[in-house]
Structures are given as C-alpha cells and as structure tokens.
Image (cartoon, rainbow, N blue to C red):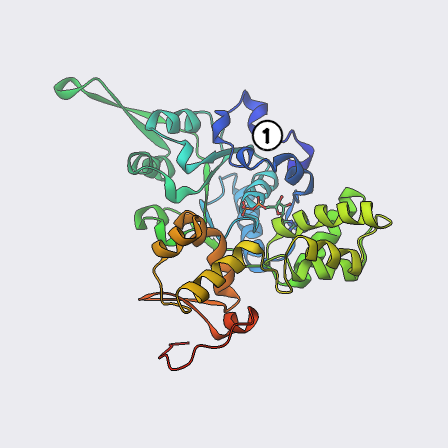
Amino acid sequence: MPVDATPPDPEAQRGGAPRELDPLEHQGERAREVSLRPGCFDDFIGQERIKDNLRIAVQAAKLRGDPLPHVLLCGPPGLGKTTLSMILAAERGVSLHLASGPAIEHKGQLAALLTRLEPCDVLFIDEIHRLTAVVEENLYTAVEDFRIDIVNGEGAYAQTLQLPLHPFTLVGATTRTALLTNPMRSRFGYDARLDYYPPEHLAQIVTRSAARLGVAISPEGAEELARRARGTPRIVNRLLHRARDFATVLGDGRVDGASAREALDRLDIDAIGLDEMDRRYLTTLIDFYGGGPVGIETLAAALSEPRDTLEDVYEPYLLQQGLLARTARGRVATERAFDHLGRPQPRGQARLL
Ligand code: ADP
C-alpha cells in the first residue's frame, strides 16, 4: 500500500479516526508534506542502519504472516518518524492509523482506536511520552497480550471484561526519549534513534523533492539549501518552497546557487543554518547571562518560549553543532557560539568550555 498513492489520511478509508488525532493537521503542512513523502524504503534517503533493520523486520513479518515488532522512533521533529511509520505499514501491506499522545485523553478513546485495528495494522502514536499514566498502563496489556480490559460497574459489583484485539504493531514516536517511562520503553521490540542528516543526504532529498514538484534546481542550489537546513528533511523541503518563490519572482524560476543564497539570506538563515530564533537563544545566553550556566526555565522566560519547545526544537541542533552545552548547573554557550556570533570570548571566568 504505497502511501503516496492512497488518500492523504489512511484513516479516511476506514470511516475515520477522531480528527484531532491527526498530528500533522495542526501544523498546516499536511498537504504539502504528503506530496513529498517517500512511500517506500528505497525512496527514504539516509538513516541506512535503521532502514536495513526495519527492512529485515518487515520481510520476516511478511514471511511468517505476523505483525511487525513494536517500534520506537526517537529524534527531533522533521527527521522522518511519521514517514517511516507510513513506509512500515505500506511495505507490510497493512493500514496505518495515526494518533497523537496528548489527543488520547482517556481509556475510552484508546479502546476506540485499538478495536478498529485489523490484523497486523500499524498504530502510530506521535509524542508517545505525553500519554497519561492511565492510558499508558492500558496500552501495556494491549501491546503485550493484544487485549484491553474494560471495567463495567463500580465498587463490589465491578466486573472486568477482557476485550480481545487483533495482533497489531505499535509505532511510537518521541522527541524526548528521556521522558518516556521505562515500562513503556521496554515494550518495544526495536528502538531506533534518528540522527540529523548530513548535507549530502539533504541535497539528495531536496533534489528529489524538486523533481517531484517540477522545480529546476542546480547541484549548487541543492547543496546550498542542504547546508543550511539544520540537518532536517522537513526544513530542506520548506527552504525549497521559499527558494522557488524567490527564483520565480526575482529570477528565471530556476533554483541555483545564487538564488538559493539570496532566498536564505532574505529569510535570515545564516551560513550554518541558524535561524533568527536560534540566534536569539544564543545571544540571550551570551549577552544577558555571560554565556551561562543558566537554567532552562530562566531562558524560557527570557525568550518567552515554552521550555518544551526550546528542549525539543532548538537545543538539539545547537548541541549537535557544538554551540551549546548542557551542564549540571545549566546551559552554557561554547567558544564556538561566541565566535559564530562575533562576541569576544569572556575572560577571567572559570568557564568549563
Ligand atoms: P517527523 O515525524 O519526524 O516530524 P516526518 O516524517 O513528518 O518527520 O518528515 C517530514 C518531511 O520530511 C516529510 O514530509 C518527508 O517529505 C521528509 N522526509 C523525512 N525524512 C526523509 C527521508 N529520509 N528522505 C526523504 N524525505 C524525508
């Protein structure tokens, strides 16, 4: 079941899950992303080790007629967790059901989702670390024994009914492995951590996306976008759309090195891919707090951003680029961060970095 060849929402085929359970709907990017989403392992660029392991798991499950093992996908937003879950379902030849942790508010909603699954179907739960404790506990019996317990009545008259489920596969996605409980994590047969993509893989992704959108792009244009996309496929695709706009209005419609650079400069994305918010994070840390250490709550208040957004979206890339360090006493800007922002290195201070 190639996902790109199916309606955008696999649930639509089955009469529909609650609409609030669609994680991409809220981001307003669904339609655009669907058209660029790879539909099979061969089109999914990079992350070779994870892909190889999942390929084998799919082949084994198909040969035995079993569901796939439960899979946990970890990593920052935009690296391909949803896409991989779609590919897993497509390659296994079953339906995918999309849900999101915070949207499953009570056990009844979980039961509704689970009882709708056909044999071997894939249930994808985004932000699985944000499930409530009650929902999570009920998920344990569902993934282990393929049943859900329903309590009927109250007090002394309460009866527990065991509702059998079809064997299915849970694919959990999380941006924050540390927030996942150990019992939940131990339920997964395969645990994959997606890394930021190197520029050469992002260049391949953006070249492929350009071809699908019918946009002419030169290798130099692709490299420029790839270098400045924070290691993230979703961002490189977004930059392609913006670069195309600039190339259409200001040039001949072709994204080459010059038009890509022009677009990125106008979007305030710097040479190593930091956007305005990344730089605001670092300048606040350096200019207001002498480069740190400073607590995350203090930074969140100073930047007027939720702590979760800083930890999930901004910090992973700054850490990976060696611009930021997390210490027991708080966040610290590294020498590289001072250099990158053109700030003099602090002197006479016992800095760790
Ligand atoms: P996540 O679920 O991790 O936030 P998604 O799976 O929604 O990320 O991926 C975002 C977009 O990036 C997708 O629409 C897809 O087009 C693209 N993408 C992600 N990973 C890859 C990849 N390895 N190869 C090609 N495109 C990718």
What x and y, as percent, mark residue 153?
Answer: 21, 17
Label 1 crowding class (10 Å Cα cut-off): few <14, some 14-19, many 20+? Answer: some
Find residue 68 and report its horizontal and vertical position in percent.
Answer: 49, 43
Q: Residue 139: horizontal and vertical position, in percent?
A: 35, 36
Quarter where residue 199 is shown: bottom right
Q: Residue at x 59, y 35 (%)?
A: 28
Q: Amino acid at mark 1?
A: Asp
Q: Is residue 321 above or below residue 175?
A: below
Mark 1, secondary structure of its residue = loop
Residue found at the far left of this picture: 156
Is residue 144 or residue 280 the one in the foreground? 280
**Which residue is nearer to you in this view: 141 or 290?**
290
List the residue tagged with mark 1: 9
Q: Is residue 184 above or below residue 199?
A: above
Q: Residue at x 53, y 54 (%)?
A: 277
Indicate the quadrant containing the N terminus: top left, top right, bottom left or bottom right: top right
In the rendered image, the residue lying farthest to the bottom is 348
Q: Would you say 159 lies left or right of 73 here?
A: left
Q: Can you say which quadrant of the picture contains the C terminus?
A: bottom left
* Residue 33 placement: quadrant: top right
Task: Report the residue at 42% width, 69% height from top.
Answer: 291
Relative to 38, is 130 on the left or the right? left
Q: Is residue 211 left or right of residue 68?
A: right
Q: Residue at x 53, y 66 (%)?
A: 321
Q: In the image, residue 185 lies at what x, y percent? A: 36, 49
Q: Nearer the viewer, residue 261 or 241?
A: 261
Name, please, the residue furthest toward the right. Answer: 252
